[in-house]
Amino acid sequence: MVRKENPVPPNVIILNAGQGRRLLPLTRDTPKCLLDVGGRPMMSWQLEALSQFELGRVSVVVGFGAEKVEQCIASITPPSLRVSTVFNPDYDKADNVVSCWAARGEMETDFLLLNGDTLFRPSVLARLLDSKPAPVTVTIDRKATYDADDMKVQCDGTTLRRIGKDVPLTAADAEAIGILYCRGDGPRRFREGLEEIVRKHDPDVRWYLSVVDRLAQQGVVEVASVEGLEWIEIDDDKDLRQAAQVVANW
């Protein structure tokens, strides 16, 4: 078992409030995070990976099908984890920036922020936890080409300069995989950035990585590359089928 010792273990926030409309009709009645991947709910793969580390509280942000998610959590949570839920009542009106805002109470100290549709081997999280300390660290991977749907990044060495789907394809150095680490004064900076966006009610700002993009312009965001390690993001039916093949070897 892989264990990472931390003086003050970070909390974990998992964003699982959405329905996953790109996976309809599979998600008509079933929350995306409960879809079957390799014979298990998608969320169980994340919880199993997290259980290999010394961590604080795990907070799962729920919304669509919240009761089903809570019932599942009770049955699949590894003994070493303390898992609770945070309800986002606006899950169907906004994207993940509002789910982050709902969980801001869990951001008082160091925390990991996970997209609920990113599955990963424990080695991915180990590399992030071992990365050079920075207020905010974005986990990235590199590939030969990128598309408009990728959350693309521009870097200067290990320092993040830009992040977003609007980063030009020709300028992309890597893609963010959906795992973020805030530590030191990073939690405060991230919370303040969230509040600024929520107060302005900007309809064009839907993703929490918009906060990270603004922080990157202050020079306080680093990247941790997980090149060569196994992970997969599940957006659509094709990804779901591929994920079943990937986790078969886990």
Image: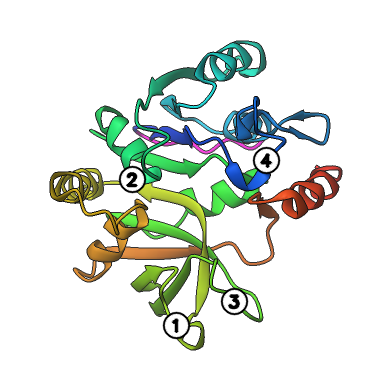
Q: Are marks 4 and 3 in contact (CB under 8 Å)?
A: no
For the C terminus, the quadrant is top right
Q: Earlier in the sequence, mark 4 or mark 3?
A: 4
Which residue is under mark 1? Answer: 168
Q: Element at badge 2?
A: helix
Residue 180 rendering spot, x and y as whole percentages:
42, 50
Which residue is under mark 2? Answer: 97
Q: Nearer the viewer, residue 215 or 221?
A: 215
**Which residue is pictured at 37% across the width and 53% down the height?**
207
Q: Marks 3/1: CA distance?
A: 10 Å
Q: How is the image coloured?
A: rainbow
Give the amino acid at mark 1. Pro
Mark whose residue sits in front, 1 or 4: 4
Q: Element at badge 1?
A: loop
Q: Marks 4/2: CA distance?
A: 23 Å
Judged by its main secondary structure, the magenta piece is loop
Q: Are marks 3 and 2 in contact (CB under 8 Å)?
A: no
Can residue 110 be seen?
no
Q: Quadrant of residue 156?
A: bottom left
Give the amino acid at mark 4. Leu
Q: Is residue 191 left or right of residue 183?
A: left
Which residue is under mark 4? Answer: 24
Q: Marks 4/3: CA distance?
A: 25 Å
Give the amino acid at mark 3. Tyr
Q: Earlier in the sequence, mark 3 or mark 2?
A: 2
Q: Which residues are magenta?
A: 1-7
Q: Earlier in the sequence, mark 1 or mark 4?
A: 4
